[in-house]
Image (cartoon, grey):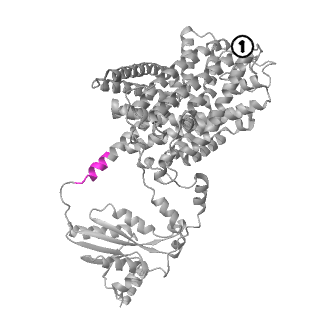
Amino acid sequence: MPRTGTLSGAGHAPEGPPVRLALVASTTSLAKRLLLGRPFRSDKLQHTLLPKRIALPVFASDALSSVAYAPDEILLTLSIAGAAAYMYSPWVTLAVAVVMVTVVASYRQNVHAYPSGGGDYEVATVNLGPKAGLGVASALLVDYILTVAVSISSGVTNLGSVIPWVAEHKVIIAMAAIFLLSALNLRGLRESGVAFAVPTYLFILVIVGMIGTGLVRVFILGDDLRAPSADLTIVAEEDHLSQFAFAFLLLRTFSSGCAALTGVEAISNGVPAFKKPKSRNAATTLLLLGGLSIVMLYGIILLAQATHLKFVENPTLQIIVNDASEGYVQKTVTTQLAETVFGGGSILLYVVGAVTALILFLAANTAFNGFPVLGSILAQDRYLPRQLHTRGDRLAFSNGILFLAVAAIVLIVAFEAEVTRLIQLYIVGVFVSFTLSQLGMIRHWNRLLRTQRDPLRRRRMIRSRAINTFGMILTAAVLIVVLITKFLLGAWIAIAAMIVIYTLMVAIHRHYTRVAEELQPTDERPVLPSRNHAIVLVSKVHQPTLRALAYAQATRPDTLTAVTVNVDDNDTRTIQAEWERRQLPVPLTVVDSPYREITKPIIDYVKNTRRASPRDVVTVFVPEYVVGRWWENLLHNQSALRIKGRLLFEQGVMVVSVPWQLRSSQDRNLDRLDRVLSQAPARGPRAQPGDEPEDGDQS
């Protein structure tokens, strides 16, 4: 007669060492390693820190690349009033440059005062409260998504100006570019930084070289350079604009040009990624970013005016059909200038087109660096799911990268990769964060000044406060202009998205807080259960059942019962006969189920057992198969999963899975499974040792 000792060995696998196919990688594992590279140890995190020469292309590529679409938006918006309105383009650009200088100067104070990587979110939360911090965070998250969508779409548009086939498949190519960019970032920050450094610096060299060559030829050599669109005759979309309407158009042009400022905040969010001294390196990178952006943006506008370049919002309606316009296809401003300066068909023309498209693709990398870091901080503060706080194999915040990629693809598909349509949603979020951040910095300096007595430190703090005050006033004014001029054109969509994200983060935080309070241990000692009633679920008398019985006996419960549900009389009689034949030393209880249900009769039986002894605990042992192939899960364990899932909701009921390894499970690549299951959340980007807040601008 079988006993417990005999039963405990009934389910042993064949003798010999376990088979672990460490040398045979699955197809998905091999693809992942080829795409992302080998995993990094957590102690290699310091090796991913960036020097300034790499940090500039990583964090500043968005702002630098804006010269590829900001001039387009300035000129096409002015074209609504006709060709004569182009004379205002240098003044609009000058206003944008003033805002750029102010924002850069203001953010240099931020990176010195808050080097921990929280950026605008941390500044607003600490100084204005959690609600303001969440407002900034929701604005930045939306802006990062739009940065990817706008940069990629603009890159495809510029590439389409040189290669017509690209223009015919904009959406597909934009999606492919996001996929490639995501893969590069998933490989790890430093590798992607090196990959982006060469094209970013090449873009700077090419654009500055084109501007310099063009201006020298026009103003020094006296060459009569005329853009391909110079001889076109364009008409205004709106005739006889009133003074008020024209002023409104200039404000709308200015707000479109302010797209050049997006990306500045990414450096304040990425301070932990810099090599030490972090704050000083970040501030220097900000200065380089601002100077290069202003030079390239203003240079392109001046060269466009000198070459009589025309760029309109609606070529079909605004360009008059004549000999000059026959066969004309509107190209981007950068492509037209390259053709004018270097000549049509020149190799340098294609270099400018290719490098411009590439830098626009890579400009989205600013968001791919900022969004995951901010998402990790928000997750650490319990405003977003904890999964966004997890580092992947290559020490990147993989879940944040993937979420950003999916969201950007949705926008690109929805707006058909049209830059002009997407740009209307843009920059609202970034100026919300600019304004609240500067207001927070003013309060920061006021708080420090109340306790600071050293004259030198006070002078530095007062100077920093003055810079942030001017920055707050100017960015608030720009935000009002943006809201007035772009609300009906699409900005309302971005605002609605911010509200939704804000509400969602509040709900997530409320949930995490409620759960934490519920799980908080009390000072009372836990009351031990009086008795333990064990129940073993039986579907057949086979080896998994015998192992479950043996294990249940080994736990020495106060009572032990085997339970089977009668959904088929013949099967039930077979079980009973086999039970008696083996003379198993555990009573078998048959629960009738006239409607052939399995889960409900078991739940009712467990409830009745629990109801009879409320202070007791009921332990349910569930035999399960362990399979090696995903499709085998569809054929087994379905009833066990349903029963376990339902039992988890019963108070005082413990559920124990008793595994039986099928032969197919021995072929499973356990090393890969171990790596997947062992991935745990890594600590987010908080302040590193020695990164103390500084008193003010160190420049």
The percent coordinates of residue 520 (x first, y second) are 26, 52
Q: Number of labelled discs?
A: 1
Quarter of the image with the N terminus in it: bottom left
Could you tell me the amino acid type at mark 1? Phe
Q: Is residue 517 magenta?
A: yes
In the rendered structure, the answer to whether residue 588 lies left or right of residue 629 reads: left
Residue 591 against residue 321 in the figure, above or below: below
Q: Which residues are magenta?
A: 513-521
**Frontmost residue, 46 versus 371:** 46
Residue shown at 77% from the left, 19% from the top: 321
The percent coordinates of residue 72 (x first, y second) are 64, 24
Q: Residue furthest bottom?
A: 1
Residue 266 makes an appearance in the image: yes
Q: Main secondary structure of the magenta part?
A: helix
Residue shown at 57% from the left, 31% from the top: 422
The percent coordinates of residue 285 (x first, y second) are 52, 31
Tell me which corner region of the image, top left, top right, bottom left or bottom right, holds residue 551. bottom left
Residue 521 against residue 551 in the figure, above or below: above
To which residue does mark 1 refer? Answer: 219
